[in-house]
Image (tube, rainbow, N blue to C red):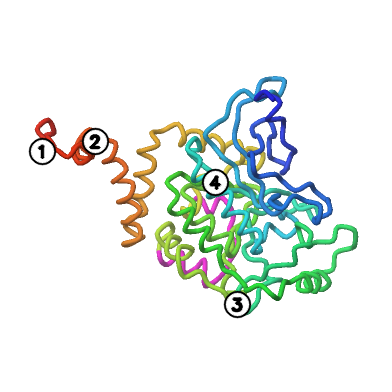
Amino acid sequence: MNATSAHPLPRRVSEIFSPARWREVSGFPHAEAGADPSQQRAQALTDITYHRGCVRGEDGAWLRDLPVARVAFNRPEVRNAFRPRTVDELYRVLDHARMSGDVGAVILTGNGPSPRDGGWAFSSGGDQRIRGRDGYRYEQEDSTAAGESEDRAYSHEADVAAAQARLDTARAGRLHILEVQRLIRTMPKAVIAAVPGWAAGGGHSLNVVCDLSLASIEHARFKQTDADVGSFDAGYGSALLARQVGDKRAREIFFLARTYDAVTAERWGVVNEAVPHAELEERALEYAATVAGKSPQAIRMLKLAFNLADDGLAGQQVFAGEATRLAYMTDEAVEGRDAFLQRRTPDWSSFPYYF
């Protein structure tokens, strides 16, 4: 199979998603919409979509890859709220992007709009229907991808009852979206949030932890709902927000839980740029391609240097690891290794004492 036939146009997963810009990622098949969950492949993605940027010819034939990945929440009918399965998939694809040596930047976004009401979302945070006393609960394996019934009139009460009836009581609750936050924070690559709609609760925090952010002028809405539902992000979601907008403004966002739009988010420093909705993904791809076109070494060190002041000893360890990698690339380090392996005294005479 040649490269062209290996990478056909993917299906349109979101209204503003351009299939010509992307291809499927090998090893990460997407579940077929509306298919019987029991017939899906075990590793098929249901709650997340994962694509690799590429260049195609006028006929749609794949020509070459771009060093950019697109990761998207895929539960638009529930404002892209996340459940444990969502977070499992999100971590898996982000970690794959982290370990891909030819990927320099990642776009994190949300597919849409909702088939129920046409609304858009980045992510509305944890799915409160399945929140238990020990965290968010897994559902039984035969649950549908969205956890919704499409063939009946919507009823909130029936929807909540159905979601709770699907819970897998044999499995403990999880709060591992925090692991995703740490992965985004420590990944030595730029993660760019493209916010097409609601970023609320845990979704608000995910935007905060991303390196760069863009938001839809028409549809993006921000609201930190934690205190409304008896939750709180006492880590990155609040501390980094205070860094971005100032302490008083961050307290306002959390304590008052008011909704604010993309233009306000740009003015406050929550996003880098508010852009027209139809241009959001294209603009995010421009950002990602620009970052990925810079020195990989410089981007790694810059990101970790920005993080270092706030991340304490853990941040210092990550930074030190990358500094060590840089040292290994020098002739001086090679001389030290080779002298040890050759059982001789290293010759440092050609290496100056820089100051």
Residue 132 lies, with reference to residue 235, above or below; the image says below
Dot 4 falls on a residue whose secondary structure is helix
Q: Alpha-carbon distance for marks 3 and 1?
A: 56 Å
Q: Secondary structure at mark 1?
A: loop
Name the quarter where the N terminus is drawn: top right
Tag 1 residue: 353
245 left or right, relative to 87: left
Mark 3 near mark 4, Cβ–Cβ under 8 Å?
no
Mark 1 to mark 2: distance in Å? 17 Å
Disc 3 versus disc 2: nearer the observer: 2
The residue at which mark 2 appears reads as 334
Where does label 3 land, which residue? 134
| Quadrant showing the C terminus | top left
Q: CA distance from mark 1 to mark 4?
A: 40 Å
Question: How far apart, in angstroms, are the residues tagged by discs 3 and 2?
Answer: 51 Å
53, 29: nearer the viewer: 29
**Residue for point 62% across, 79% down:** 133
- Of callouts 3 and 2, the N-terminal one: 3
Residue at the spot of label 4: 96
Question: How crowded is the residue under tag 4: few (<14 C-alpha within 10 Å), some, or many (20+)?
Answer: few
Q: Residue at x 64, y 64 (%)?
A: 84
Q: Position of residue 61 (x, y in %)?
A: 69, 23
Residue pictured at 84% horizontal, 61% vertical: 149
Q: Earlier in the sequence, mark 2 or mark 4?
A: 4
Q: Which residues are magenta?
A: 247-266
Q: Image check: 346 left or right of 67?
A: left
- Identified by mark 4, the residue type is His
Looking at the image, residue 144 sits to the left or right of residue 127; the answer is right
